[in-house]
Amino acid sequence: MVISSEENNSIAMMPKKFQGGMDQKGGRFAGKNNRRSLSVINQNLVQGQSYPCVVNKRVLMSDKHEICEKKQADMGHRPITRRFAAKIAGSQQSYVEKPKNSNPLNSNEFGNAIAIDDEHKSPANQPLPMILESTDPMNTDQHEMEEVEMEDIDGEMILDIDSCDANNSLAVVEYIEDLHSYYKQIECIGCVSPHYMAKQVDLNERMRAILVDWLIEVHDKFDLMHETLFLTINLIDRFLAKQNVIRKKLQLVGLVAMLLASKYEEISVPAISDLIHISDKAYTRKDVLDMEKLMLNTLQFNMSLPTAYVFMRRFLKAAQADKKLERVAFFLVELSLVEYEMLKFPPSLVAAAAVYTAQCTVSGFKHWNKTCEWHTNYFEDQLLECSMKMVGFHQKAGTGKLTGVYRKYGSAKYSFTAKCDPACFLLENNNQS
């Protein structure tokens, strides 16, 4: 092949590492240093800064459901399974009930307890993918809220809380308002009568509180997601409102509700054998499967209902909550899950009251701005009744026998959130008025 003078001049102007690309025989580039790695190209495109991961995959939780086969060596801390049995047995003495048709559970039915691994393993760091298609600079401050004059009341601006997610397709900014409007319309479908326990012959409110307090501890030990806990309690209440259950089967109802909620929300579901172990082998595999069929048929397989968690995430975003405020809000709303009397409030009101009470707890004064009012559709006066109940729950959280939520949020994992002082001034202001 003959190389013209123009081609010869162009080759001479090329970088040296590409000049060696022509072999002596005039063939194609044959040099070994004529290719750069994709990582180097990526760094040059984005000026040495790699793009963050667009979608963070959840880590499979196969290691999080490890169940120890030996008894606990620490005799000072009773296993959660034996505490549940003892509390159910003692609830008959501390609560005035109607005549019962069956014998109460006693602690001997559960046998030896199985300890759960307390270690919470942190997910491994995921590799960041290389993105070559886009070189636009990323918005580094995701928490900035653009002020948009949606409504001007007393000179206070309402923040557009979705402006920071305009480029995030997973945030579905175009539909988020319609979604939460729909959630508000159908939330009443998932609510139950606040007096349904009167129809139960062998159960009472105290037993429900013991079950929920125990399940919160089990949920934390299994390290499941928040959605799973809220859906579990919702399934229990809806099932008990339609089906009479004897006291001996109450724990089974709770375990099966958590199993169904895990199948709906989790990637890795706890094994049935693990649930049997956590109940001290009080039930068999057949018992679990039979109760699962009964619960699904009773609820007509209706699992897609908004719980308080759905509203909590939206309302916390409206409140521009930091980690501290978020933990206090979830601490208060989980205290409310234990209390039977809180069933009279819809999930959206419970979530809004939890955020409002958390703001008052952290700041030390009443705090409910127009942005929170706009996105929750609740005025401050509408939240006071529910909020005062939460303050009362906070005051007595560390006392009595049902202290599962207090122990959970009193640990270092949750930054000792339960140790904060309750917003008692909310009760004082109401008494003065």
Image (cartoon, rainbow, N blue to C red):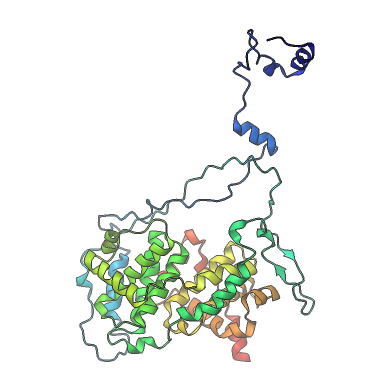
Number of marks present in the image shown? 0
Question: Is 197 in front, or is 418?
Answer: 197
**In the rendered image of this protein, does residue 226 appear above or below residue 153?**
above
Q: Is 16 left, or right, of 241 in this rendering?
A: right
Q: Position of residue 433 (x, y in %)?
A: 63, 92
Q: Give the residue at x 43% y 86%.
A: 194
Q: Is 262 left, or right, of 163 in this rendering?
A: left
Q: Is 420 left, or right, of 247 in this rendering?
A: right
Residue 386: tell me if it is visible. Answer: yes
Dividing the picture into quadrants, the one containing residue 358 is bottom right
Question: Is 10 in front, or is 119?
Answer: 10
Could you tell me which quadrant the N terminus lies in?
A: top right
**In the rendered image of this protein, does residue 387 appear above or below residue 275?**
below
Given the current orientation, which residue lies at the most extreme front position? 1
Q: Give the residue at x 39% y 78%.
A: 237
Q: Position of residue 388 (x, y in %)?
A: 55, 83
**In the rendered image of this protein, does residue 151 appear above or below residue 126?**
below
Given the current orientation, which residue lies at the most extreme top position? 24
Dividing the picture into quadrants, the one containing residue 21 is top right
Q: Position of residue 386 (x, y in %)?
A: 54, 82
**In the rendered image of this protein, does residue 8 appear above or below residue 356?**
above
Residue 284: tell me if it is visible. Answer: no
Q: Is 205 left, or right, of 378 in this rendering?
A: left
Q: Position of residue 143 (x, y in %)?
A: 67, 59
Q: Give the residue at x 50% y 76%.
A: 394
